[in-house]
Image (cartoon, coloured by chain):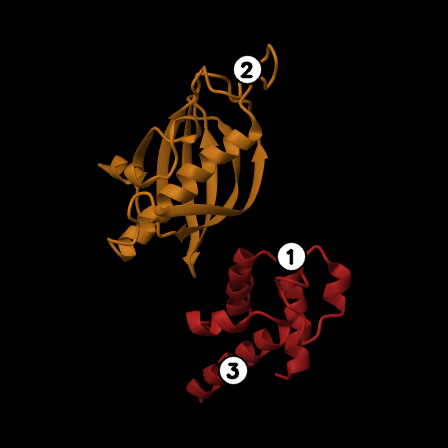
């Protein structure tokens, strides 16, 4: 049921980094993503030694931790505010530390807790855990979701 | 609380969000937070929230909208402090 919110995500195929939302409330979201072994970045990062780039780890945390929760909060305020395809999320700041590498095929879980949602800006404390529940990355994420009217 | 006092305190509130420390030391009423201090617009929300906590005031959407330069920030903060003091008599 919580996966309904994924229909509102503006990403497609190679840049959508959310598989499943297992918990979603006004204050917290939990979701997971399994890194595709054939993802476009593994061929070049690094040659012969595929490791998930930090920017992709950051993007996974932002999509689950900020965008999914942000869309949910906007939808809670106004059911009609987030028509699919009209949402343009903007990441405004991140402060992340990385603790473990993520390898191709790994499943990661993102837990995001709301610090505040005011004047349209959502700030969260976000952690990523691997399948052994060990900390992969953590940090503060902020962003806004801009509404664009498509013709 | 005088405007000068608020200005001095505002510098410490703004400090974490700008890398332009030289400009921060010489701010005046006309200093634009986004253009001059290169603060990203989303961080204005953090400055507003920090100011609310510091002065125990609440800044609504319309007031927040006015807070674009140092002068208007001081005006909004001093206005809200005044409102608070009047309420508590």
In this rendered view, identify the residue nearer to me: B56 or A119. Answer: A119
Locate residue A119: give its quadrant: bottom left
Image location of residue B50, percent across then percent down: 54, 64
**Residue A19 to residue B56: above or below:** above
Give the colour chain B carries in the figure: red
Label located before the other in sequence (3 or 1): 1
Pointer 1 local density, CA inside 10 Å: few below 14, some 14–19, many at least 20 = few
The chain shown in orange is which?
A
In this rendered view, identify the residue nearer to me: B74 or B72. Answer: B72
Q: Secondary structure at mark 1?
A: helix
> For the residues carrying marks 1 and 2, which lies nearer the camera in this image?
2
Question: What residue is pinned by disc 3?
Answer: B79
Q: Secondary structure at mark 3?
A: helix
Question: What residue is pinned by disc 1?
Answer: B16
Residue at horizontal 25%, vertical 38%?
Answer: A4
Question: What residue is pinned by disc 2?
Answer: A43
Task: Report the number of numbered marks.
Answer: 3
Pick out the residue farthest to the front: A151
Alpha carbons under labels 1 and 2: distance apart: 39 Å
Residue A113 as seen in the image, left or right of residue A26: right
Q: Chain of mark 3?
A: B
Residue A150 as seen in the image, left or right of residue B18: left
Judge whether residue B56 can be spotted in this image: no
Q: Chain of mark 2?
A: A
Residue at horizontal 58%, vertical 56%?
Answer: B40
Q: Secondary structure at mark 2?
A: loop
């Amino acid at each position: 049921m919580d996966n309904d919110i994924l229909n509102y995500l503006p990403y497609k195929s190679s840049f959508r980094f959310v598989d499943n939302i297992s918990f979603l409330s006004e204050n917290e979201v939990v979701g997971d993503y399994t890194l595709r072994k054939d993802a476009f970045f593994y061929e070049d990062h690094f040659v012969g030694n595929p490791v998930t780039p930090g920017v992709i780890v950051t993007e996974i945390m932002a999509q689950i931790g900020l965008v999914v929760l942000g869309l949910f909060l906007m939808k809670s305020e106004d059911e009609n505010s987030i028509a699919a395809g009209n949402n343009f999320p903007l990441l405004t700041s991140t402060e992340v530390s990385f603790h473990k590498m993520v390898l191709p095929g790994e499943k990661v879980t993102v837990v995001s807790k709301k610090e505040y949602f005011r004047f349209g800006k959502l700030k969260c404390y976000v952690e990523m855990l691997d399948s052994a529940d060990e900390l992969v990355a953590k940090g503060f994420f902020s962003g806004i979701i801009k509404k664009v009217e498509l013709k | 609380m005088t405007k000068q006092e608020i200005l001095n305190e505002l510098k410490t509130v703004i400090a974490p969000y700008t890398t332009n420390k030289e400009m921060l030391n010489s701010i005046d009423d006309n200093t634009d937070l986004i253009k001059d201090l290169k603060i990203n617009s989303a961080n204005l929300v953090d400055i507003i929230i920090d100011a609310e906590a510091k002065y125990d005031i609440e800044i609504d959407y319309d007031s927040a909208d006015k807070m674009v330069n140092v002068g208007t920030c001081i005006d909004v903060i001093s206005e809200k402090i005044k409102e608070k003091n009047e309420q508590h008599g």
